[in-house]
Image (spheres, rainbow, N blue to C red):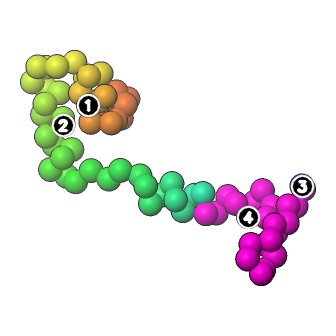
Amino acid sequence: MEETTRVLGNEEVSATPSSAAKPIREVRAKTLRQFSVEDKILIVLEGFRKAIPVSDLGRREGISSALYYS
């Protein structure tokens, strides 16, 4: 693996591909959308009503059809 060194301000920071993985995982975990129980129930009930297709419902709510069915 190749190590990259950058100077930020007065200190030198070295970065390896593995050192960037942890902050990326942390950001992804913090930015995941979390639905409340009430939101989940409302989405499922709306799908049961069949007023709109599940694909459109998922698009509107930002979830995949597979996630809806699971």
Which residue carries the number 2 mark? 43
Q: Earlier in the sequence, mark 1 or mark 4?
A: 4
Q: Are marks 1 and 2 in contact (CB under 8 Å)?
A: no
Does residue 68 sit above or below 5 in this rendering? above
Residue 50 relative to residue 66: left or right: left
Name the residue at the bottom extreme. 10
User: Is residue 6 at all visible to an observer of this figure?
Assistant: yes
Q: Earlier in the sequence, mark 1 or mark 2?
A: 2
Q: Earlier in the sequence, mark 1 or mark 3?
A: 3
Q: Which of marks 3 and 4 is nearer the N terminus?
A: 3
Which residue carries the number 1 mark? 60
Query: Residue 11 magenta-drawn?
Result: yes
Tell me, for residue 28, which label it has, or none: none
Residue at image position (11%, 19%) is: 51
Q: Position of residue 43 (x, y in %)?
A: 18, 37
Which residue carries the number 3 mark? 1
Residue at image position (74%, 72%) is: 8
Name the residue at the front extreme. 9
Q: Which of marks 4 and 2 is in front?
A: 4
Spatial separation of the CA atoms under disc 3 and disc 2: 46 Å
Q: Nearer the viewer, mark 3 or mark 2?
A: 3
Residue at image position (85%, 66%) is: 5
Per the rendered image, the range of residues in magenta is 2-23
